[in-house]
Image (cartoon, rainbow, N blue to C red):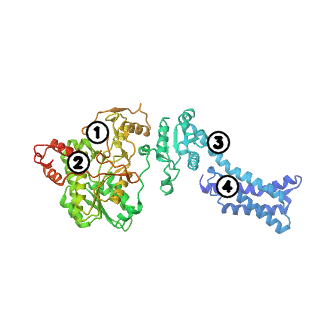
């Protein structure tokens, strides 16, 4: 009901209750008296009438939505009624020197009873309508009976249009189990999720514990998956505290929630010292990693942020996005250029003189690079060489190359080309004032060309989801995690290091596919999983460091550093000179051999020092 219709109706109801209550109270005390002939009572009734409406307006009783009435609304009624009765008592004493205490006490109680009852009747009427709709609402289990969980329950009860009807809580606090909150029973602990869901015909689950650690959240989500019921969560406590979202903003479980790993936190002071007020260049700025690196850097207020990429559409997109949020004193400069064009890259370095370079431009698709090895060489090897040499010549302070775990003992062209690029950077670090480092991480969830978008597309098409091998594993991380690692590595750089993120345990690709099917609201029976066989160049598992590079000590929480293991300058320069003359198989043999530190002989390399 609109305010224009509700306001006069509430005023009319209150007027009748307020005006006649004092007569009713006095009649109870003096049943044989004609109360309407008592002028003192009439004056008291008019006084309480005026006082009540004035206080009702002051406390906003006519602006509240009473179908959602709760303790706060009843408190407002209590104040308005109490102060209006006190006002009448003061007037009675001032005019007659006497107060009708008993009559006013009854009047006070009648006001609370009838005014409060009239308001709560709106709530009862609304709840009745919800109960009628209950068969159409999904029976919902809320995990967590704390402040967040009860707030979610109240929000759902007040908004049946969400299509969810909370019916019970799950909470591990034994002092809450068996009790009721907002009429909903705390049915047991998290160990009973599956049984409780089955016994109560649960159709929807909401995890409402925003402060829960990520590893605990991941386990909880997996337990919910065992029910076969669609599961959602509320946002993380950090996002709630920063005001990004509300506790009642329910969202679907994301695949990264299942990693069970706390994201890396930045050393803000060190990074700010390196980036704030400086000129920063990001190559591949339109890609998944490059664009996120750019977003993270923008927060530190650089003097200039150079967004370099070969694809104009992707650079245009990240440029327009950042312009909405970037600080006014930061100059955003989109640059269309190809890292394979050494003259153009040198021209950019000389023109802008960046302090820090983040090199994220690369080809990264393993099977595609197996079929196009020279393209991997041109982009990943020569492209890195061009950007790194230009950085060295122009006096860049720090150069951070984005690498991959596929560079460790690589059997494929893509991984070998990235390891070769690492060697170029490591060799330059030995003779340059620029701090050259590389950063390795595993598969990035949701990045372009990753397995997640493919699986989602297959699920949307009705399946099946194709997995290469049931035992294939990979390390996974989120795009923000990868980008933070790159930025943090730049602040830790001393020159020649290979930084690696502790990404926990590797994940089976088939488990990832099954979890994504469940997250999409399907069962494995509805969306099948098929094994297509290992593709060209793929490994069964990935490594982050080879045996010669392993160091157990962390240089920063969750960041390790590998020992530098470059090849000689002579070897690198010779191979770089000869690669354009080779065919695809020769290219693969040579760069894979060098990446794995094996002796390689081809007709064009017999005279080499290898």
Labels 4 and 3: the sequence-earlier one: 4
Label 3: few (<14), some (14–19) or many (≥20) C-alpha neighbours in 10 Å? some
Q: Where is residue 332 in the image (x, y as percent from the top left)?
A: 32, 64
Q: Where is residue 425 in the image (x, y as percent from the top left)?
A: 24, 55
Labels 3 and 1: the sequence-earlier one: 3
Disc 3 versus disc 2: nearer the observer = 2
Label 2: few (<14), some (14–19) or many (≥20) C-alpha neighbours in 10 Å? many
Labels 2 and 1: the sequence-earlier one: 2
Disc on res. 10? 4
Q: In this view, does 348 lie to the left or right of 441?
A: left
Disc on res. 539? 1
Q: In this view, does 57 lie to the left or right of 287?
A: right
Disc 4 versus disc 3: nearer the observer = 3
Find the distance from the CA under tag 3 to the CA under tag 2. 62 Å
Labels 4 and 1: the sequence-earlier one: 4
Q: Name the residue under label 3.
A: 179
Q: Mark 2 points at which residue?
A: 417
């Amino acid at each position: 009901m609109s305010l224009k219709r509700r306001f006069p109706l509430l005023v009319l109801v209150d007027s009748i209750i307020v005006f006649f209550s004092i007569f009713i109270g006095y009649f109870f005390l003096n049943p044989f008296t004609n109360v309407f002939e008592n002028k003192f009572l009439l004056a008291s009734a008019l006084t309480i009438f005026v006082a009540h409406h004035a206080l009702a307006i002051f406390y906003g009783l006519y602006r509240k939505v009473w179908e959602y009435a709760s303790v706060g609304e009843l408190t407002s009624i209590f104040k308005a009624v109490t102060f209006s009765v006190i006002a009448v008592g003061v007037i009675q004493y001032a005019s007659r020197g006497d107060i009708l205490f008993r009559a006013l006490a009854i009047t006070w109680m009648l006001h609370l009873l009838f005014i409060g009852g009239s308001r709560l009747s709106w709530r009862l009427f609304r709840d009745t309508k919800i109960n009628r709709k209950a068969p159409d609402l999904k029976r919902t289990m809320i995990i967590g009976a704390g402040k967040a969980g009860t707030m979610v329950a109240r929000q759902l009860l007040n908004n049946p249009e969400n299509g969810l009807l909370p019916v019970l809580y799950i909470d591990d606090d034994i002092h809450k189990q068996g009790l009721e909150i907002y009429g909903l029973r705390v049915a047991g602990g998290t160990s009973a999720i599956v049984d409780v869901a089955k016994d109560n015909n649960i159709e929807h689950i909401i995890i409402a514990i925003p402060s829960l650690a990520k590893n605990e959240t991941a386990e909880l989500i997996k337990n919910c998956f065992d029910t076969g019921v669609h599961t959602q969560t509320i946002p993380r406590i950090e996002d709630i505290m920063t005001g990004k979202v509300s506790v009642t903003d329910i969202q679907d479980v994301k695949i990264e929630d299942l990693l069970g790993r706390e994201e890396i936190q930045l050393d803000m002071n060190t990074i700010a010292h390196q980036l704030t007020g400086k000129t920063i260049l990001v190559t591949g700025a339109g890609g998944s990693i490059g664009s996120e690196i750019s977003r993270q850097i923008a927060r530190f207020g650089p003097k200039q942020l150079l967004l370099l990429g070969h694809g104009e559409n992707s650079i245009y997109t990240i440029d327009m996005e950042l312009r909405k949020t970037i600080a006014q004193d930061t100059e955003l400069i989109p640059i269309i250029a190809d890292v394979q064009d050494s003259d153009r890259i040198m021209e950019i370095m000389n023109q802008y003189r960046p302090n820090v370079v983040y090199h994220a431009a690369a080809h990264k698709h393993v099977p595609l690079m197996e079929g196009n090895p020279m393209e991997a060489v041109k982009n990943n090897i020569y492209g890195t060489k061009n950007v790194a040499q230009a950085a060295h010549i122009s006096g860049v302070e720090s150069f951070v190359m984005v690498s991959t775990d596929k560079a460790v003992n690589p059997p494929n062209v893509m991984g070998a080309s990235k390891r070769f690029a690492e060697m170029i950077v490591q060799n330059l670090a030995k003779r340059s004032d620029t701090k050259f480092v590389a950063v390795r991480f595993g598969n990035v969830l949701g990045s372009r060309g990753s397995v997640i978008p493919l699986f989602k597309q297959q699920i949307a098409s009705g399946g099946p989801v194709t997995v290469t091998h049931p035992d294939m594993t990979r390390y996974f991380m989120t795009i923000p995690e990868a980008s933070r690692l790159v930025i943090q590595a730049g602040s830790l750089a001393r020159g020649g290091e290979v930084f690696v993120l502790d990404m926990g345990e590797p994940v089976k690709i088939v488990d990832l596919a099954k979890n994504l099917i469940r997250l999409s609201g399907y069962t494995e029976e509805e969306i099948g999983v098929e094994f297509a066989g290992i593709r060209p160049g793929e490994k069964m598992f990935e490594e982050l460091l080879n045996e010669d590079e392993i160091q157990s000590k962390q240089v920063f929480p969750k960041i390790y550093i590998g020992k530098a293991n470059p090849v000689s300058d002579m070897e690198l320069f010779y191979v770089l000179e000869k690669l354009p003359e080779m065919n695809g198989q020769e290219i693969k043999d040579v760069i894979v051999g060098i990446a794995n530190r094996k002796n390689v002989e081809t007709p064009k390399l017999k005279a080499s020092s290898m």
